[in-house]
Amino acid sequence: MELYAQSLTEYKRLPTLEVQVGDLKIGNFNPILIQTMTTTDTMDTAATVAESIRCINAGAQLVRITAPSKKEAENLLNIKNELRRRGYNTPLVADIHFTPNAAEIAARIVEKVRVNPGNYVDKKKFELIEYSDADYVEEIERIQNRFTPLIKICKEYGTAMRIGTNHGSLSDRIMSRYGDTAIGMVESAMEFLRIAEGENYRNIVLSMKSSNPIVMVEAYRLLIKTMQDELGHCYPLHLGVTEAGDGEDGRIKSAIGIGSLLEDGIGDTIRVSLTEDPELELPVCANIIKRYGAAPMAALPAIPAQMLKNLNITDRHIRNTFPVQNVGGKNVPVVIAGLSSLSKIAHADLKPMGYIYDAALDKWKIGDMAADFAYTGNTKVDFALPGTLKLITDVASWVNDGNRKCFPLLNVAQYMNDAVNRSPLLNFVNVDLYAPEVSEVDKKNLLKKLSHDYTSVICLQSANANAVQSIRRMCLEFIENDISNPVILFCNSEKMNLEESLIHFAIETGSLLIDGFGNGIWLNDGVTDKTVLNSIAFGILQASRARISKTEYISCPSCGRTLFDLQETTAKIRAVTNHLKGVKIAIMGCIVNGPGEMADADFGYVGSGPGKITLYKGKEVVKRNVPAEVAVQELIELLKENKAWVEPEVLV
């Protein structure tokens, strides 16, 4: 076993125990399953049944329903009976947070219960309490006494369980000892898992969710290693980025977090948590897992033990690089846009890349998501460029261009040929170390030349089905050979639709950025609108915490506990705040998904009762019970009071 994965050079599933959920089997190399959660009031049987059926028809293989109290848990029987009467046998999952009694009722009715160890028995009041070792042991015993009855019921009824840890809802006890860390997340789950193991109950799936994909990925990897070291086996894993949001951003963030783990064979069931109707989550799930079929993997060199230190799962390293102009070093990752398909380039062609030309003033307006480079191929630009934009052209065109803001792109053969002209300042070199035409001798000579070249940026790409593993393996080879040139992650998509391309781009570049590899991204396909492609590129950098260029929304996907229309409210808040670069705003439907699960946010908008909103700064309550009709304006006032507000600039 290599750290947390069965293989780091190809797609190979992690071996796990097998869990039975109704007629389904999870883990142990069974197909990856997809699921969602209803948004209706659980006491409204007809609405919950109807929404469950829409989700099942859209592809859901499990459907989760909230059961915040005993009455909702009891009504699960009516929902289940009606679904079965209509011929739907999809397993149901009860979602439990604060109420053990509800879990014990639900476990006698549905096929699976989900409990959150952060609030099932423990408390979350944001209190820092010093626990002596004796106090800590006493608390564990209290948890055992309260949790064991549920285990016994699950054993008796054949009910499965998910121990679902959330980054933002770690208990005060865990926070006091471990802090707001991946280690704390793992320990929170392991405490419950040890109790279950002691009762010889193993029909368990685990999850480690966070709204931050970096934290999420680290926590899952650490959990796997902890289970292997302590138990000698791994339980199946349910993957998801919690509070991912909606639209393009929600899909990008989910694809990066879930895909980064699936690439290494980790994950047995997934959910994409979007602030949209739940049936819309299922096609996204399906597009993610379809990548992991039977496509043949290219054989890559094995990763020697000494290289694995650069993939330390508890201490993430960013690959050190020297700067070449504005690429690498301490510079933020760059975005390269493509214009080479155009036979002639006009001012207006730069608008999709974030540059708007005012002809009357002969000035450029530059947006926060303005690409840093444009690849023009052999097409010449015959007007003055905006101040921050540089061009990349094919080397033959560069020789004749004479533009001081233009730099050449070379393939390996051109780069190795000393007779080919190049820039004394900045060159881009397309590299695929594992391409069939690159021999070991060629690779050795290329690496030797790069190691002494402080003008070249490497554009890494791979045509292999295991492209992520291929590029990661190349980056490890660079580290091993002391090659510190900046790396651009070049990703090409030939997918049939926008959502497939978005997921492809997010996984193949975002997973590498999560692991600390990449000083820029270059996305390429011949179908997607250039404005959308540019937005996806910046969205990937933002979701992987590599470059912040816009407002970030941590928005829960709604459920039966939600106290207002999340989709409508999220749209309203986004409409008036989407110009606040770098500000993180959480929009939570109820107190369960409130101050805890928005741990990463700067400001919070949380449902506290029918028609009432509580506003937060970080984890601190600022205004309680604000009427919903004025709450968005009150949020703006809160942003202004904390100097987080700027007036939006009007771009035309």
Image (cartoon, rainbow, N blue to C red):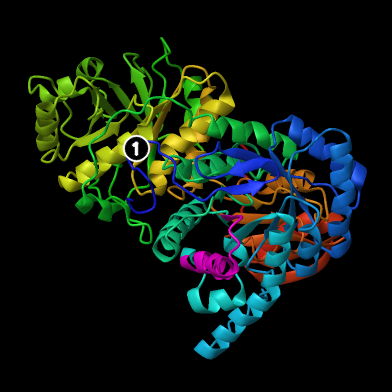
Magenta residues span: 183-206
Q: Please, what secondary structure does the residue beneath circle 1 have?
A: helix
x and y percentages locating residue 155 in the rendered image:
68, 60
| Residue plotted at (35% across, 14% down) | 379
x and y percentages locating residue 514 in the rendered image:
42, 48
| Residue plotted at (9% across, 31% down) | 445
Front-most of residues 490 and 642: 490
User: Relative to residue 619, is residue 633 drawn left or right?
Assistant: right
Q: Can residue 99 be seen in this view?
A: no
Quadrant of res 405? top left
Q: On the rendered image, what quadrant is the C terminus found in?
A: top right
User: Relative to residue 237, is residue 436 drawn left or right?
Assistant: left
In the image, residue 62 above or below residue 142: above
Front-most of residues 406 and 485: 485
Tag 1 residue: 469
x and y percentages locating residue 42 in the rendered image:
86, 51
What secondary structure is the stretch in magenta mostly built from? helix
Q: Was residue 392 drawn as part of the magenta stretch in this picture?
A: no
- The crowd level at tag 1 (other Cα within 10 Å; few <14, some 14-19, many 20+) is many
x and y percentages locating residue 348 in the rendered image:
51, 21
